[in-house]
Image: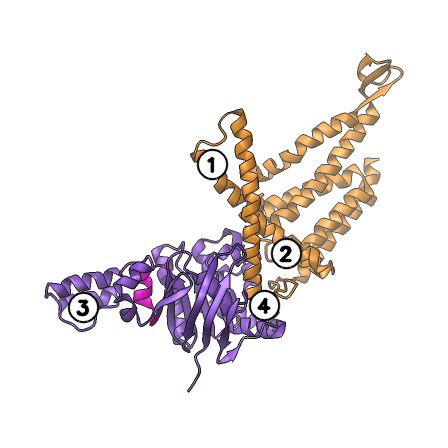
Amino acid sequence: MIRIDQAAYSSPWYSFHPAVKLGLVAASLLLVLALDTEIISISVLLSMSLLVILAARVSWRFYLNLMLIPLCFLVAGCAAVAVTNSIQPHGLWPAVYAGGLWWGISDGSWHQAQALMLRCLACVSAMYLLALTTPVVQLVYVMRMLKIPDVITDLTGLIYINIFTFLQTAQDIYIAQQSRCGYRGFKGQFSSLSALVSNLFLKNLHRTSACYDGLLARGFNGSLEVLEEPYIFKPVHLAAVSIFISSLLMIYFYGGRYAA
Amino acid sequence: MQPDLLTVRDLYYRYQDGTNALNGLNISVPVNCRAAILGANGAGKSTLFLHFNGLLRPLAGSVYYRGREVQYNKKALMNLRQRVGIVFQNPDHQLFSASVWQDISFGLMNQGCGKAEARMRVEAVGEQLGISELFFRPTHFLSVGQKKMVSLAGVLAMEPELIICDEPTAGLDPENAQLFMHVLNQLQQQGKTIVISTHDVNLAYQWADLVWLLHRGQVLAEGSPLEVFDQDELLKQAHLETPWLLEIWRVMEAQGLVSADMPPRSKAQLRQALHE
């Protein structure tokens, strides 16, 4: 997670207007889900991956690693979809007889699994493009633009920054415990871990009240009002997104015909 | 006569667990001074600071700002907090936003500053403190020194008259500590009043014009560093020690090696005295 965050901050797309970035990703997701054809899924998967690697300059190795994470779940999930049953073995491979039915992969179920896999990968790649180019602060900015209530946007921002101190505190406690021989033996594992969790809670409570003082000292009055960073809105970006979406639609309307 | 900037009179404060943090404390901070509140851990320094801009309300006694007693209604407090800025010891407790730019602007927006004005002031503060290149970096990947500077920027942007720094050099390496103190000096020269808290006797001796020695929520001694650090008994009582410059000077004086009437306040002054 920290590496994704770092990538987003060092991304060449960092200063692009977050609404345009979110728009590109949201439109792609919508098309993949609504049109539900393999050719669109493949187009989005390919173009998003190319954008991540070539335009947003994420190393392909790192990107591949990121894609592997959901892939594990997807393979398991799609395998379940691919396997089907029938009362007769015809059209099934490998036809296995169990519990009064024939089990195997049929043409139809194979295609269904394949389409599902592509759709999911396309969506994941689009989400990665967003995550790897747009820090949470910018997403919160778009949330504010969309008039999402302050409570939600403020909490999103606070939780996000807290994750980092939370992880750091947990790590510090863990190291301190280990250096005094914590986590030894079966019982030790549990007692050390429970001590860590309860301590983490207390520490965070203390930290939160200190943070609150910090906010009050600067005149906090109920909502976290800040000056947004100056984002660059370039019409050319919007044009590029429109062209991209139109070409996806063209692929759907014309390309689909050739495929069929 | 111009009244002192901030005065606390007979201040008492007790925490919920029964600890008496402040026991009839009196302090008066003159305009445009460089002051240090000196005390060991638990002497009441941080508690006192929280009274300076109304984050804590005293059990007894009162706080005066420019001769007028501090009121604890919302409007008066907002006003006070705009004039008295606190830079907390731990920058992680102060930086709430992941964006440096947003964090610096926070106080300004609370003041009801317009966007264009806020933007100008954030940029000016960034320039002044030399942190403009950090604006669009995430706060959680900054070094401690950088975080500390950003915390100061967030306070400075509100253009306070009095800047309070709780343990300004804690956790900083010598270079960053020096840089931070240098920035505080510059601010004082520009007319701000600076109060720091510290248990570092050497820092207080070399940097401050005015020192209060705190012990168990009371002022044991106050005055110029030379006056305060001359009182060995009181220093001992406060669990502190004599600054090394003064200690060396006394030894040299006793041996008749030096004969200047004023002890040196810095390494450079000591070197100069040795040359003479």
Please tell me which of labels 2 and 4 falls first in the chain: 2
Q: Chain B is which colour?
A: purple
Q: Are marks 2 and 4 on the same chain?
A: yes
Please tell me which of labels 1 and 2 falls first in the chain: 2
Residue type at tag 3: Gln
Please tell me which of labels 1 and 4 falls first in the chain: 1
Identify the element where label 3 is drawn. Answer: helix
* Region of the chain picked out in magenta, as a range: B199-210
What's the chain of the residue with tag 2?
A
- Residue at horizontal 64%, vertical 43%? A50
Quadrant assignment for the C terminus of chain B: bottom left
Q: Residue furthest left?
A: B256
Left or right position of A149 against A61: right
Q: Nearer the viewer, residue A25 or B259?
A: B259
Q: Which residue in the protein does label 2 denote?
A: A138
What's the chain of the residue with tag 4?
A
Graded by Cα atoms within 10 Å as few (under 14), some (14 to 19) or many (20 or more), the crowding at tag 1 reads some
Q: Are marks 1 and 2 on the same chain?
A: yes
Q: CA distance from mark 1 to mark 4?
A: 39 Å
> Can I make out residue A8 in this image?
no
Q: Are marks 3 and 4 on the same chain?
A: no
Q: Which residue in the protein does label 3 denote?
A: B272
